[in-house]
Image: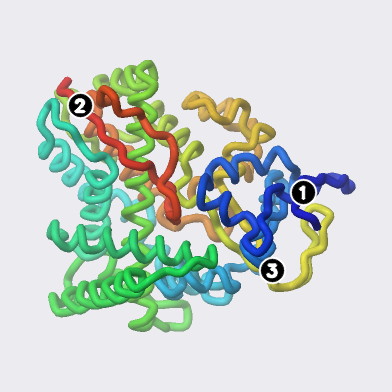
Amino acid sequence: MSSSARATATTTHTHAAAPGAVPGLGHLPALVRDPAGFLGRLPGLGDLVEIRLGPNRLVVPCHPELLRQVYADDRTFDKGGPLYQRFRRILGNGLATCAHADHRRQRRLLQPEFRPERVAEYADVMTREAALLAESWRPGEVVEVFPACYRFTLRVVARSLLGTEVPEALADRLQHAFETAFAGALRRVMLLPAGPRYRAAVRTLERTVAELVRDHRAAGAGRRDLLAGLLTARDEDGSMLSDRELHDQVVTLLLAGAETTASQLSWTLQLLTAHPRVLAAVQAELDAVLTGGRPAAWADLPRLPYTARVLTEALRLYPPGWVLLRRCTREVELGGRVLAAGSQVLLSPYVAHHNPRIFADPARFDPDRWLPERAAALPRWGFAGFSNGPRQCIGADYARAEAAIALATLLVRYQPAALPGEPLHDRPVRLTTVLRPRRLRLRMLGR
């Protein structure tokens, strides 16, 4: 298929090739320069769009039915392939990266630690940490939003996972190592050199996680944290997680439990600052529930439906996990096109969430599109804020609770305001696996 925009009708779907491919590089320059803009234009080309990353050809499903087919059949559309291996260098073979053959066993072993009653226990940690974050700010203080949110989410996941606080220096080391490692991995995916800093960051993650697990084991039995549950978890045949599997799960949980929710919180604060009427509606709900400006708790969440809709809408506009790679394990038909075994599929929640055939006026920040009666009319497979199908994020309920508790606790006490002369950036950081805003500074006014 040529690189020119060309749509061809099939029985039910259209195919297209994205325009602007550069010889030898494909669409790498466009993805590096403006990834959100490039991906956001794909739904206008067709239901199944081919893009090129260097010599690699990938297809991007944009239609809900094609999304359903790929998300639901994780045996045929499996995680793997040469591009995906670069991420496994960092995360290992954990729940987020393992192939279908390992996924069922790993999910069975981890699932008990994410039951509702366990999430309710973790929520106590979320409430304490959110209160500490709110108390650490002073009215009128200018806050670097993403770093502040990241330190909060990392402390929460570390206390949930390890039952201990994370010193500030360790939190900074982990954040820097994750950012550097994933930026390097993404450069390698895009066939660019990663450099020595990438290799050093991967080694730092290896050493740091090994230290955390070793210290946890040395502390002895009787703990109620997530890692203690993983250390004693048994599969149906009595098998346990190996030391390597345990290491990979800890790395995965530290990443998934910190950077993704920090990104969601950052985008939500940016959107609310830019939409004062929505912010006022959120704060009116919070004032009615969190009397005296107290921190939010697990029991409060059912009484904060508008806050939940705001967070879901922010997740739609800026899904942290915005690109997901799959590899065809056999020849398969997708949207009228036959894909050979080994073909690569790029699933992009960002593409689906900005598709006007799925979400009306997709660029508009509209929390009420998630009212029950309106949400019921949306395509089942159109929203993938936490992925979808058998590979949906195991910690989705944990993440929802964490984001809601943090946002409510902050906004019941503070009024975020933009700084004069500093625009509210709506473009993400380039070359990042988690969609997060560029530098975002807000003044936190007391209420």
Residue at image x 33%, y 38%? 404
Q: Residues within 10 Å of mark 3 (few under 14, many from 20)?
A: many
Mark 2 secondary-structure assignment: strand
Which sits earlier in the primary sequence, circle 1 or circle 2?
A: 1
**Residue nearer the viewer, 259 or 419:** 419
Identity of the residue drawn at 75% across and 43% down: 46
User: The N terminus lies in which quarter of the figure?
Assistant: bottom right
Residues marked 1 and 2 touching at CB (< 8 Å): no
Crowding at dot 1, Cα within 10 Å, few <14 / some 14-19 / many 20+, comes out as few
Residue 347 vs residue 4, the one in the foreground = 4
Asked whether the beta carbons under mark 2 and mark 3 sit within 8 Å of each other, the answer is: no
**Residue 286 at x, y = what percent?**
28, 24
What is the crowding at mark 2: few (fewer than 14 residues within 10 Å), some, or many (at least 20)?
A: many
Separation of marks 1 and 2 at Cα, in angstroms: 50 Å
Where is mark 2, residue-wise? 414
Q: Residue 138, located in which quarter of the rendered image?
A: top left
| Residue 291 versus residue 347 in the image, above or below | above
Per the rendering, the mark at residue 382 is: none
Dot placed on the residue nearer the N-terminal end, 2 or 3: 3
From the image, tell me which residue sits under label 1: 4
- Which amino acid, mark 1? Ser
Counting residues from the start of the chain, the first of labels 3 and 1 encountered is 1
Q: Which residue is mark 3?
A: 328
Proximity of marks 3 and 1: CB atoms separated by less than 8 Å: no
